[in-house]
Image (cartoon, rainbow, N blue to C red):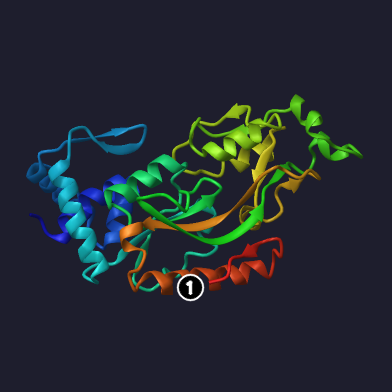
Amino acid sequence: MVDLETLAALDGLLWLRTGEAAADKLALSQPSISRRAKAAQTVFEVSSKKIDGEWDLLSDADLLNAERRVHQLARWNGLAPLRLEASYWWEPLLTQPSPPGWMIGLCNIVGVPRNLELLRLGIVDAWIAPAPDVPAQSDADFCTLHLSAMPVHCVVAPNHPLLKKSELSFDDLEGFPSLALPSGAYPQVEIALKAVGLWSSPVRMQRYTPNQWEGRSEAELTIGYATAMSLDLLGGSLVKLPLTLPLQSGDSLVLKRAFAERPQVAPLVAELRQRLQVIQQRWPEIRLYSP
C-alpha cells in the first residue's frame, strides 16, 4: 500500500530513534523522513509518540504489520538493503564497513525485549545478540546462530580499593555498588550476577551511553562488567578483578526462522566470523564457533 521508502521512514524512526539518524541511514533528507513517516501513519491509521526518548505506536497496527511482512520479503529479495542491529561493542569494532547487502543500526539499544520486538515486527531483519540472553535453539519463531563465546569479568577503576586486596572473594564486593540495568533487560545475566551479590545499583538506560555505564565505574567505586570486546573498546580505562564470574557471554546472530535458509545468511555469518577472528588475535579468551 506504500512504497519501500515511505514505510522505511516510519520504521526508521522506530528503530533509529531520531529523524537525523534515520535520514543518514536511509539516504533521505530529514524533512522527507518526517513527511513520509506521517504519510505512512495516515495510510495505516496509526499514531506515534516519543516515550522515554523512543518512538512508539499508540494504536493497533494489524494492517501496518501485514505491510511490513511484504516489505521485509522485498528486502530479502534484494530490493533494499537488509537491516542488521547489534550489541554496542560491535560498533565500531566489527561493523565497519557494513557487510555487503546490509544496513547496520546504531548498535546502542539496551536489552533483549526491544531488539526482539524489532525482529518480530520485521522492522529489523537480523540482530547480533549477546549470550546468554538469546532465543533457545528450540524457539519456534527465531533461529540463533552462535558466533563466539567469552568470559565476563568484573571491572573497576585503576585506583579502586578492591585492587589492594591480596585475596578476593565475592563477599568482599558486597560493600560496593555494582552496575545494574533495568529489570528484565538481560534476564539471564541479571539472575547470574544477583546470585553472587552483584547487580545492585540500577542505571536507567534504554540506549547505551558510555558515561552512564563504564563512566560510572571510571569515576566512582562502582563495580562494572566487561568482556574482551568491551575491554577492547575501553582501552585500559578499567581493570579486571581476579574473580571468575559464573557467566559466559558471547555473540549470536538471531533472525526469524522463516529466513534462516536465505542465501544472504551464510555469507553474513562467514563475514562476521572473519571479523571476530581479527579481534581474537588480541583477545585469545574469545572462542569462536565453527561454521
Which image quarter holds the N terminus? bottom left
Who's the residue at 52% across and 45% down the image? 133
Question: Looking at the picture, does residue 19 appear above or below residue 171?
Answer: below
Tell me where residue 60 appears, x and y as whole percent.
Answer: 17, 35
Q: Quadrant of residue 290?
A: bottom right
Q: Residue furthest top?
A: 175
Q: Residue at x 17, y 40 (%)?
A: 61
Q: Quadrant of residue 194?
A: top right
Q: Amino acid at mark 1?
A: Glu
* Residue 273: image location, x then y, percent: 54, 70
Residue at screen point 45% across, 53% down: 107
Where 149 sits versus 176, above or below? below
Task: Determine whether 225 is above or below 76 in the image.
Answer: above
Any part of residue 180 in sight: yes
Location of residue 164 (image quadrant): top right
Horizontal side, residue 120 vs residue 184: left or right = left
282 versus 191 height, above or below: below
Single out the residue that lies furthest toward the front.
138
Q: Nearer the viewer, residue 122 or 206?
A: 122
In this rendering, would 233 be left or right of 82?
A: right
Total tally of numbered discs in the picture: 1
The residue pinned by badge 1 equals 271
Q: From the viewer's perspective, is 168 left or right of 283? A: right
Q: Which element carries disc 1, helix, strand or loop?
A: helix
Residue 31 in the image: state x and y as whole percent: 18, 51
Whether residue 28 is visible here, answered yes or no, is: no
From the viewer's perspective, is 93 left or right of 219?
left
